[in-house]
Image (cartoon, helix red, strand yellow):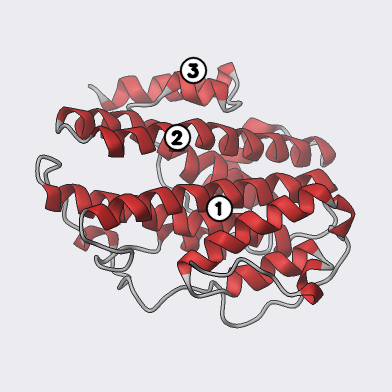
Protein backbone atom coordinates (compact mmCIF):
# COMPACT_ATOMS: atom_id res chain seq x y z
CA UNK A 1 0.00 0.00 0.00
CA UNK A 2 1.40 3.41 -0.93
CA UNK A 3 1.52 6.28 1.56
CA UNK A 4 -1.02 8.99 0.69
CA UNK A 5 0.63 11.54 3.01
CA UNK A 6 1.46 14.87 1.38
CA UNK A 7 4.10 17.15 2.87
CA UNK A 8 2.88 19.85 5.31
CA UNK A 9 4.50 22.50 3.14
CA UNK A 10 2.46 21.39 0.14
CA UNK A 11 -0.83 21.09 1.99
CA UNK A 12 -0.53 24.70 3.18
CA UNK A 13 -1.58 25.54 -0.38
CA UNK A 14 -3.93 23.12 -2.15
CA UNK A 15 -2.85 24.29 -5.60
CA UNK A 16 0.81 23.75 -4.74
CA UNK A 17 -0.08 20.30 -3.43
CA UNK A 18 -1.88 19.52 -6.70
CA UNK A 19 1.29 20.40 -8.61
CA UNK A 20 3.37 18.16 -6.33
CA UNK A 21 0.99 15.24 -6.91
CA UNK A 22 0.97 15.89 -10.65
CA UNK A 23 4.77 15.41 -10.57
CA UNK A 24 4.46 12.07 -8.75
CA UNK A 25 5.58 9.24 -11.03
CA UNK A 26 4.12 6.21 -9.24
CA UNK A 27 0.49 5.72 -10.34
CA UNK A 28 -0.79 4.17 -7.09
CA UNK A 29 0.82 6.89 -4.99
CA UNK A 30 -0.57 9.59 -7.28
CA UNK A 31 -4.08 8.13 -7.01
CA UNK A 32 -3.92 7.86 -3.21
CA UNK A 33 -2.59 11.40 -2.82
CA UNK A 34 -5.15 12.89 -5.21
CA UNK A 35 -7.95 11.38 -3.13
CA UNK A 36 -6.37 12.54 0.13
CA UNK A 37 -5.90 16.10 -1.16
CA UNK A 38 -9.57 16.42 -2.11
CA UNK A 39 -10.65 15.19 1.32
CA UNK A 40 -8.31 17.64 3.08
CA UNK A 41 -9.26 20.60 0.89
CA UNK A 42 -12.96 19.94 1.21
CA UNK A 43 -12.50 20.23 4.98
CA UNK A 44 -10.32 23.36 4.68
CA UNK A 45 -11.19 25.27 1.49
CA UNK A 46 -9.23 28.26 2.77
CA UNK A 47 -6.09 26.32 1.80
CA UNK A 48 -6.91 27.23 -1.79
CA UNK A 49 -5.07 30.39 -2.83
CA UNK A 50 -6.50 31.39 -6.22
CA UNK A 51 -3.88 34.13 -6.65
CA UNK A 52 -0.79 31.97 -6.02
CA UNK A 53 1.64 32.22 -8.94
CA UNK A 54 3.28 28.84 -9.42
CA UNK A 55 6.22 28.22 -11.74
CA UNK A 56 5.91 25.30 -14.14
CA UNK A 57 8.53 22.59 -13.58
CA UNK A 58 10.07 20.73 -16.50
CA UNK A 59 8.96 17.24 -15.46
CA UNK A 60 5.22 17.36 -16.14
CA UNK A 61 3.39 15.12 -15.96
CA UNK A 62 4.88 12.65 -13.54
CA UNK A 63 4.37 9.16 -14.93
CA UNK A 64 6.10 5.79 -14.84
CA UNK A 65 8.56 4.59 -17.47
CA UNK A 66 5.90 2.22 -18.77
CA UNK A 67 3.58 2.04 -20.65
CA UNK A 68 5.41 2.72 -23.86
CA UNK A 69 3.70 5.65 -25.61
CA UNK A 70 3.02 5.10 -29.31
CA UNK A 71 0.91 6.59 -32.08
CA UNK A 72 -2.81 5.78 -31.73
CA UNK A 73 -2.85 4.20 -35.18
CA UNK A 74 -0.40 1.52 -34.04
CA UNK A 75 -2.72 0.23 -31.31
CA UNK A 76 -4.66 -2.80 -32.49
CA UNK A 77 -8.18 -3.67 -31.37
CA UNK A 78 -8.70 -7.11 -29.90
CA UNK A 79 -11.79 -9.20 -29.35
CA UNK A 80 -13.42 -8.88 -25.95
CA UNK A 81 -14.40 -12.54 -26.13
CA UNK A 82 -10.93 -13.47 -24.82
CA UNK A 83 -9.26 -12.71 -21.50
CA UNK A 84 -6.29 -11.28 -23.39
CA UNK A 85 -8.52 -8.89 -25.34
CA UNK A 86 -10.31 -7.71 -22.22
CA UNK A 87 -6.99 -7.17 -20.44
CA UNK A 88 -5.86 -4.90 -23.26
CA UNK A 89 -9.14 -2.97 -23.02
CA UNK A 90 -8.90 -2.61 -19.24
CA UNK A 91 -5.34 -1.35 -19.64
CA UNK A 92 -6.44 1.24 -22.20
CA UNK A 93 -9.17 2.44 -19.85
CA UNK A 94 -6.73 2.58 -16.93
CA UNK A 95 -4.41 4.71 -19.05
CA UNK A 96 -7.25 7.12 -19.82
CA UNK A 97 -8.09 7.41 -16.12
CA UNK A 98 -4.43 7.92 -15.15
CA UNK A 99 -4.21 10.75 -17.67
CA UNK A 100 -7.50 12.14 -16.37
CA UNK A 101 -6.01 12.40 -12.85
CA UNK A 102 -3.17 14.43 -14.35
CA UNK A 103 -5.51 16.65 -16.35
CA UNK A 104 -7.64 17.50 -13.33
CA UNK A 105 -4.60 18.26 -11.16
CA UNK A 106 -3.14 20.37 -13.95
CA UNK A 107 -6.29 22.52 -14.07
CA UNK A 108 -5.99 23.12 -10.31
CA UNK A 109 -2.42 24.37 -10.20
CA UNK A 110 -2.09 25.97 -13.63
CA UNK A 111 -4.92 28.49 -13.86
CA UNK A 112 -4.96 31.29 -11.27
CA UNK A 113 -7.64 33.82 -10.39
CA UNK A 114 -10.60 31.47 -10.66
CA UNK A 115 -13.25 31.11 -7.92
CA UNK A 116 -12.41 28.66 -5.13
CA UNK A 117 -15.25 26.44 -6.33
CA UNK A 118 -13.34 25.90 -9.60
CA UNK A 119 -10.41 24.35 -7.75
CA UNK A 120 -12.64 22.25 -5.49
CA UNK A 121 -14.49 20.95 -8.53
CA UNK A 122 -11.30 19.81 -10.24
CA UNK A 123 -9.89 18.31 -7.05
CA UNK A 124 -13.10 16.28 -6.81
CA UNK A 125 -12.63 15.18 -10.43
CA UNK A 126 -9.02 14.15 -9.69
CA UNK A 127 -10.18 12.07 -6.71
CA UNK A 128 -12.89 10.33 -8.71
CA UNK A 129 -10.52 9.64 -11.62
CA UNK A 130 -8.13 8.17 -9.05
CA UNK A 131 -10.92 5.87 -7.84
CA UNK A 132 -11.59 4.76 -11.41
CA UNK A 133 -7.89 4.06 -11.96
CA UNK A 134 -7.77 2.00 -8.77
CA UNK A 135 -10.83 -0.04 -9.77
CA UNK A 136 -9.40 -0.76 -13.22
CA UNK A 137 -5.94 -1.58 -11.84
CA UNK A 138 -7.44 -4.07 -9.40
CA UNK A 139 -9.50 -5.69 -12.14
CA UNK A 140 -6.48 -5.77 -14.46
CA UNK A 141 -4.53 -7.58 -11.75
CA UNK A 142 -7.20 -10.29 -11.76
CA UNK A 143 -6.24 -10.89 -15.40
CA UNK A 144 -2.59 -11.22 -14.38
CA UNK A 145 -1.52 -7.79 -15.63
CA UNK A 146 -0.55 -4.38 -14.32
CA UNK A 147 -0.68 -0.84 -15.65
CA UNK A 148 2.27 -0.44 -18.01
CA UNK A 149 2.10 -3.94 -19.50
CA UNK A 150 0.72 -2.74 -22.86
CA UNK A 151 1.52 0.26 -25.08
CA UNK A 152 -0.71 3.34 -24.97
CA UNK A 153 -1.03 6.75 -26.64
CA UNK A 154 -0.71 10.30 -25.29
CA UNK A 155 -3.66 12.06 -26.92
CA UNK A 156 -5.23 13.41 -23.72
CA UNK A 157 -2.06 15.03 -22.39
CA UNK A 158 -1.29 16.38 -25.86
CA UNK A 159 -4.45 18.50 -25.70
CA UNK A 160 -3.48 19.65 -22.21
CA UNK A 161 -0.22 20.92 -23.65
CA UNK A 162 -1.97 22.74 -26.47
CA UNK A 163 -4.32 24.53 -24.05
CA UNK A 164 -1.78 25.24 -21.32
CA UNK A 165 -2.06 29.03 -21.66
CA UNK A 166 -5.83 29.36 -22.00
CA UNK A 167 -8.26 28.19 -19.33
CA UNK A 168 -11.22 28.83 -21.66
CA UNK A 169 -9.73 26.52 -24.30
CA UNK A 170 -8.94 23.92 -21.65
CA UNK A 171 -12.53 23.85 -20.43
CA UNK A 172 -13.85 23.71 -23.99
CA UNK A 173 -11.61 21.00 -25.35
CA UNK A 174 -10.76 18.61 -22.52
CA UNK A 175 -13.96 17.98 -20.53
CA UNK A 176 -16.44 19.12 -23.19
CA UNK A 177 -14.71 17.35 -26.10
CA UNK A 178 -12.31 14.58 -25.11
CA UNK A 179 -14.02 13.46 -21.91
CA UNK A 180 -17.46 13.84 -23.48
CA UNK A 181 -16.40 11.28 -26.09
CA UNK A 182 -16.19 8.83 -23.19
CA UNK A 183 -19.91 9.35 -22.55
CA UNK A 184 -20.55 8.10 -26.08
CA UNK A 185 -18.05 5.23 -25.94
CA UNK A 186 -18.95 3.73 -22.55
CA UNK A 187 -22.34 2.10 -23.32
CA UNK A 188 -21.21 0.04 -26.34
CA UNK A 189 -18.05 -1.06 -24.52
CA UNK A 190 -20.10 -2.03 -21.49
CA UNK A 191 -22.51 -3.98 -23.70
CA UNK A 192 -19.69 -5.98 -25.29
CA UNK A 193 -18.18 -6.77 -21.89
CA UNK A 194 -21.55 -8.00 -20.62
CA UNK A 195 -22.06 -10.09 -23.77
CA UNK A 196 -18.68 -11.68 -23.09
CA UNK A 197 -19.86 -12.55 -19.58
CA UNK A 198 -17.48 -10.11 -17.89
CA UNK A 199 -20.00 -8.51 -15.56
CA UNK A 200 -17.34 -7.38 -13.07
CA UNK A 201 -15.64 -5.20 -15.69
CA UNK A 202 -19.03 -3.99 -16.98
CA UNK A 203 -19.91 -2.81 -13.46
CA UNK A 204 -16.76 -0.67 -13.39
CA UNK A 205 -17.91 0.97 -16.62
CA UNK A 206 -21.19 1.84 -14.88
CA UNK A 207 -19.29 3.67 -12.12
CA UNK A 208 -17.11 5.49 -14.63
CA UNK A 209 -20.02 6.65 -16.79
CA UNK A 210 -21.95 7.92 -13.77
CA UNK A 211 -18.99 9.98 -12.55
CA UNK A 212 -17.91 11.17 -15.99
CA UNK A 213 -21.32 12.75 -16.56
CA UNK A 214 -20.53 14.89 -13.51
CA UNK A 215 -17.05 15.71 -14.79
CA UNK A 216 -18.33 16.90 -18.15
CA UNK A 217 -21.02 18.88 -16.32
CA UNK A 218 -18.24 20.63 -14.37
CA UNK A 219 -16.47 21.41 -17.65
CA UNK A 220 -19.67 22.83 -19.12
CA UNK A 221 -20.26 24.92 -16.01
CA UNK A 222 -16.86 26.59 -16.07
CA UNK A 223 -16.77 26.98 -19.84
CA UNK A 224 -20.03 28.91 -19.71
CA UNK A 225 -18.88 30.86 -16.64
CA UNK A 226 -15.82 32.02 -18.57
CA UNK A 227 -17.83 32.81 -21.70
CA UNK A 228 -20.32 34.85 -19.67
CA UNK A 229 -17.49 36.74 -17.97
CA UNK A 230 -16.08 37.75 -21.37
CA UNK A 231 -19.47 38.37 -23.03
CA UNK A 232 -18.80 35.54 -25.49
CA UNK A 233 -21.38 33.40 -27.26
CA UNK A 234 -20.69 29.89 -26.00
CA UNK A 235 -21.60 28.10 -29.25
CA UNK A 236 -19.52 30.32 -31.54
CA UNK A 237 -16.64 30.32 -29.06
CA UNK A 238 -16.56 26.54 -28.90
CA UNK A 239 -16.44 26.28 -32.70
CA UNK A 240 -13.63 28.83 -32.85
CA UNK A 241 -11.56 27.08 -30.19
CA UNK A 242 -12.12 23.62 -31.69
CA UNK A 243 -10.75 24.90 -35.01
CA UNK A 244 -7.90 26.91 -33.44
CA UNK A 245 -6.61 24.00 -31.34
CA UNK A 246 -7.34 21.26 -33.89
CA UNK A 247 -9.76 19.34 -31.69
CA UNK A 248 -10.80 15.88 -32.89
CA UNK A 249 -13.82 15.89 -35.16
CA UNK A 250 -16.98 14.75 -33.39
CA UNK A 251 -18.45 11.52 -34.75
CA UNK A 252 -21.49 9.55 -33.64
CA UNK A 253 -23.19 7.60 -32.38
CA UNK A 254 -23.72 9.99 -29.48
CA UNK A 255 -25.09 9.28 -26.03
CA UNK A 256 -27.68 12.06 -26.06
CA UNK A 257 -29.15 11.22 -22.66
CA UNK A 258 -25.76 11.35 -20.93
CA UNK A 259 -24.74 14.50 -22.80
CA UNK A 260 -27.98 16.22 -21.76
CA UNK A 261 -27.35 15.20 -18.13
CA UNK A 262 -23.79 16.55 -18.51
CA UNK A 263 -25.05 20.02 -19.38
CA UNK A 264 -25.06 20.20 -23.17
CA UNK A 265 -27.94 22.41 -24.26
CA UNK A 266 -30.59 21.55 -26.82
CA UNK A 267 -28.93 23.55 -29.61
CA UNK A 268 -25.72 21.57 -29.13
CA UNK A 269 -27.61 18.29 -29.06
CA UNK A 270 -29.45 19.19 -32.28
CA UNK A 271 -26.11 19.92 -33.96
CA UNK A 272 -24.79 16.54 -32.82
CA UNK A 273 -27.95 14.87 -34.09
CA UNK A 274 -27.17 16.35 -37.51
CA UNK A 275 -23.65 14.91 -37.37
CA UNK A 276 -25.08 11.56 -36.32
CA UNK A 277 -27.46 11.50 -39.29
CA UNK A 278 -24.80 12.54 -41.81
CA UNK A 279 -22.36 9.89 -40.57
CA UNK A 280 -24.96 7.16 -41.10
CA UNK A 281 -25.62 8.09 -44.73
The disc at residue 178 is none
Q: How many marks?
A: 3
Q: CA distance from mark 1 to mark 3?
A: 23 Å
The residue drawn where x is 32% and y is 19% is: 277
Residue 69 in sight from this viewpoint = yes
Q: CA distance from mark 1 to mark 2?
A: 34 Å
The quarter in which the C terminus is drawn is: top left
Residue 255: give x, y in percent of width and height: 41, 24
Mark carried by residue 270: 3
Label 2 element class: helix
SS for callout 1: helix
Q: Nearer the viewer, residue 95 or 171?
A: 95
**Horizontal and vertical percent position of residue 144:** 21, 60
Q: Are marks 1 and 3 in contact (CB under 8 Å)?
A: no
Q: Which of pointers 3 and 2 lies earlier in the amino acid sequence?
A: 2
Q: Name the residue located 50 percent from the left edge and 21 percent from the top edge.
A: 269
Amino acid sequence: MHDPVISPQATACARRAALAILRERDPATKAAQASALFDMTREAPSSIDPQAALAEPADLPGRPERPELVEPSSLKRRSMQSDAGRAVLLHALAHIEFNAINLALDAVWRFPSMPREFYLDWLKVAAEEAHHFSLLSARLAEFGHAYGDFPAHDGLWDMAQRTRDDVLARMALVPRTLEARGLDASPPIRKRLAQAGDHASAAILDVILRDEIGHVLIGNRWFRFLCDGQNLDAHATYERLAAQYHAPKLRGPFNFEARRDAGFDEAELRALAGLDESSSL
